[in-house]
Structure formats: structure tokens, C-alpha cells
Image (cartoon, rainbow, N blue to C red):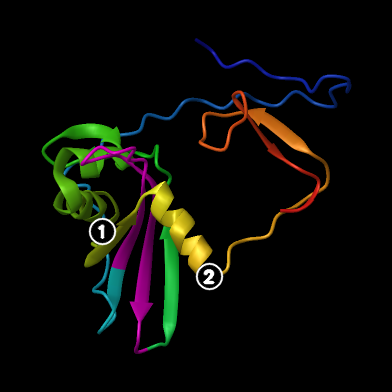
Amino acid sequence: VSPTNIKPSGAAPTATAKAAQPTKVSQPTQQSKPQYGKYPEGQVRIMVLGSDSRGEAVARTDVMMMVSITPSTGTVTVLSFPRDLWVNLPGVGMNRINTAMVFGGFNLLAATLDNNFGIRPDHYIMTTFKGFISIVDSIGGIDVNAASTLTDRCALPQAVRGYCTIKAGVN
């Protein structure tokens, strides 16, 4: 299949762009593993995970953020990993990063991050959506100012005949 030039609708083309040529991307191997420097002294890396569990003992992670705390510099950094990022899970093969916890728990997730990105978390914390609601409630909740009434289909406990509504104003 050869690439096709695309013209914006409603606008006359001013020049024809040369089509980009596909680039072959090699699969990660143990030899192509990223090699990064040592971690700063005293740095602690914590994975913050949001599980999509709906009662299962093990579930995928919909939120994956690595928080790095470096006391020597007084800095905290956060790196977010897209849940559908395609990576090599050691011993499993290519799959979405959010399946690592299902296939092998935190040990596999840590090995996956180390193998693909050269960073390894020291600890993790995981919560479910219900846990996240409790965390938000414990800090006083979040006010949302809706410009107009919003209604959509939903399957939540507060649904009325299959619909959830947020009224206009502060909620």
C-alpha cells in the first residue's frame, strides 16, 4: 500500500507534500534494553496504580504513574504511562502495559518497566475506583461547575431508569 496525500476539506491545496515512507521498527530485545545512568542517591520510585477491578482479585491497571522522590535535590517527578502502551512483558511477550499486574503482579510490572524503559520502581500503591472516590472525599471532594445540565446513559447506582444527570451549577 502506498501512502496517499491528504487535502484539508474546504481549502485549496497550496503545495503537494511528499508522502512519508514507512520506517521499519525493530522489536525490543534484551540487547536493545535502554541503558541509563544510576539513580540519584536516596531516590525512591513509587508506582501509583489505579485498578479497573470490579471485584476480581487481580485486574488491569487503568492508571499507571511513577512518582520519583529525590531528597538530595528536593524534587518530586511524576511520569505517566498510557495504559494501552504496547511493550514486551518479560516471559509473556508483547502486550499492553496495563496487563502486567494480571500476568505477574508487581514483580512483572517492575521487570517490564526496567526491561522497556530502564527504570525500576521500588514500591507501589494501588487503589480501585471506589478507593479513589474515598481519597477525593477525604480531602473535601471536588466541586464541578457545569454550565448546563448534563444527562447520559449510565449503569451506576445513582442512575434513574439508566440515566445519570448533573444539574447546571456547582455540584
- Residue drawn at x 22%, y 47% is 32
Give, as a single range, the part of the protein colored magenta.
46-72
User: Label 1: how many residues lie within 10 Å, few (<14), some (14-19) or many (20+)?
Assistant: some
Q: In the rendered structure, does residue 62 fall within the stretch colored magenta?
A: yes
Residue drawn 88% across the image and 23% down it: 11
| Residue contact at pointers 1 and 2, CB within 8 angstroms | no
Mark 1, secondary structure of its residue: loop
Q: Work out whether 119 lies above or below 33.
A: below
Q: Quadrant of residue 35?
A: bottom left
* Left-right relation of 123 to 171: left
Label 2 neighbour load within 10 Å: few <14, some 14-19, many 20+: few
Q: Where is residue 70 shown, x and y percent of the image?
A: 35, 81
User: Which mark lies nearer to you, 1 or 2?
Assistant: 2
Nearer-the-camera pick, 5 or 108? 108
Kindly identify the amino acid type of the residue bearing the numbered disc 1: Gly
Query: Going by the image, does 95 lie left or right of 152?
Result: left
Residue 96 lies in the magenta-colored region:
no
Residue sitting at the far bottom: 72
| Cα–Cα gap, marks 1 and 2 | 35 Å
x, y percent for residue 137:
52, 62
* Residue shown at 37% from the left, 49% from the top: 128
Is residue 145 visible in the rendered image? The answer is: yes
Give the residue number, with chain letter if any, for mark 1: 118
Q: Quadrant of residue 94?
A: top left
Residue holding disc 2 = 139
- What kind of residue is marked 2? Ile
Q: Report whether 35 appears left or right of 171.
A: left
Q: Element under label 2?
A: loop
Q: Is residue 73 left or right of residue 6?
A: left
Q: Nearer the viewer, residue 171 or 64?
A: 171
- Compared to residue 10, the image places residue 140 above or below, namely below
